[in-house]
Amino acid sequence: MTLYAIYEPKFGKIDEAPQAVPEKFSWAATLLPPVFLLRHGLWLELLGYAAALVALVFAAPFIGGSAAFWLYVLLAAWLGFAAASIRGAALRRGGWRYRADLTAPAEDTARLVWLKLGRDT
């Protein structure tokens, strides 16, 4: 089972379902960072990622190609570990409210459990 952070939409937007963000390492964020960031609508984070890549490309002649490669690997691994926090921060910036942590076997199940039982907690 996975721990999910539940976020509810802005006040007055009842037609939107809550978001369940898994609190675990994200292989998608590590292996395909731009796709992960685009899929979750993390535009500001995508710009930061692109700026980091440009900085690595320009720094490569000075620090060496292998050092730049390992710095990229470190950046990708960090993004995999921080993916849940990044998604949560983006939701809070968008007006979503953190409500609870739930354990569930899947994201849809966590949303369903929150809709059925969690509104009172």
Image (cartoon, helix red, strand yellow):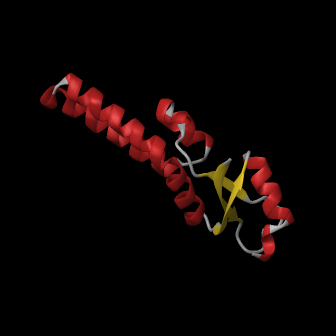
Q: Nearer the viewer, residue 84 or 4?
A: 4
Residue closest to the eye, 116 or 83: 116
**Quadrant hosting residue 75:** top left
Q: Is residue 10 depicted above or below 36 in this figure? A: below
The residue furthest front is: 1
Count numbered badges in the picture: 0
* Rendering coords of residue 16 (x, y %): 79, 60
Identify the residue at the far left of this view.
62
For the point 27% across and 34% down, the residue is: 56
Residue 81 in picture, x, y percent from top left: 46, 45
* Quadrant hosting residue 113: bottom right
The answer to whether 44 appears left or right of 111 in the picture is: left
Residue drawn where x is 70% and y is 70% of the image = 10
Q: Position of residue 28 (x, y in %)?
A: 55, 34
Q: Judge by depth and name the residue closer to the eye, 53 or 26.
A: 26
Q: Residue at x 52, y 60 (%)?
A: 89
- In the rendered image, residue 13, in percent from the top left (x then y), is placed at 78, 68
Q: Residue furthest right?
A: 116
Q: Give the image quarter of residue 65.
A: top left
Residue 59 vertical position relative to residue 65 in the rendered view, above or below:
below
Examine the rendered structure and indicate whether residue 17 appears above or below residue 25: below
In this rendering, the answer to whether 115 lies above or below 51 is: below
Image quarter in which the C terminus is found: bottom right
Task: Report the residue at 35% width, 42% height from top.
Answer: 51
Q: Is residue 6 left or right of residue 53?
A: right
